[in-house]
Amino acid sequence: MTIRQLKLNANLKHIDLTEGQQFKPEFLKMSPLHTVPVLNDNGLVIWESRAIIQYLCNQYAPDSGLYPSCAKKRALVDFYINIDFCLDDMTKFKEVLQVLDQLIGDKAYLTGNELTIADLSLLATLST
Ligand SMILES: N[C@@H](CCC(=O)N[C@@H](CS)C(=O)NCC(=O)O)C(=O)O
């Protein structure tokens, strides 16, 4: 979603987890914890989704509202990107959703009226 929003040319490769393609030696060399997604940007290899989307914005769209450069706006994006982690704890899932609902209020997106990578990250987590 971040690649599409930034209109980047990327060579996307599908790794079929149901077939265990993430355990192939050449994939494990890039992603030792056998997880997707993985980014290989001319030799820079990183495999945490949040780190990947932050890097893509920093490297290819430093002025994009998707990851604002203003420290205070960026702090809010980082805050929501990290709150996303709380959703991994299924015992707190409902509570986190209720708090998120209150925080979002009547805003169009998590941090205001502009789409940011926090929305994309949370969307990926919640849809999964
Ligand atoms: N914190 C990681 C989680 C990545 C993750 O768990 N990916 C799952 C699919 S959603 C995966 O690759 N599972 C395959 C496996 O663990 O073998 C991220 O955000 O990139």
Image (spheres, helix red, strand yellow):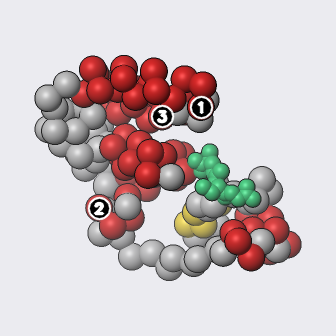
Q: CA distance from mark 1 to mark 2?
A: 30 Å
At x 54%, y 46%, the residue is 51
Q: Earlier in the sequence, mark 3 or mark 1?
A: 3
Q: Can you identify the residue that label 2 sits on? A: 5
Of the pair 101 and 112, the residue shown nearer to us = 101
Q: Quadrant of residue 73?
A: top left
Q: Quadrant of residue 59?
A: bottom left
Mark 2 secondary-structure assignment: helix
Q: Do residues under tags 3 and 1 come within 8 Å of each other at their CB atoms?
A: no
For discs 1 and 2, the disc positioned in front in the rendered view: 1
Mark 3 crowd level (few <14, some 14–19, many ≥20, 10 Å Cα): many
Q: Quadrant of residue 28?
A: bottom right
What amino acid is labelled 2 in the image?
A: Gln
Q: Can you identify the residue that label 1 sits on? A: 90
Mark 1 crowd level (few <14, some 14–19, many ≥20, 10 Å Cα): few
Mark 2 crowd level (few <14, some 14–19, many ≥20, 10 Å Cα): few
Q: Earlier in the sequence, mark 3 or mark 2?
A: 2
Query: Does 7 sit above or below residue 111?
Result: below
Q: Position of residue 38 (x, y in %)?
A: 61, 61
Q: Can you identify the residue that label 3 sits on? A: 84
Query: Does 85 sit above or below residue 6?
Result: above
For discs 3 and 2, the disc positioned in front in the rendered view: 3
Q: Position of residue 72 (x, y in %)?
A: 29, 23
At x 63%, y 60%, the residue is 36
Mark 3 secondary-structure assignment: helix
Work out whether residue 19 can be spotted.
yes
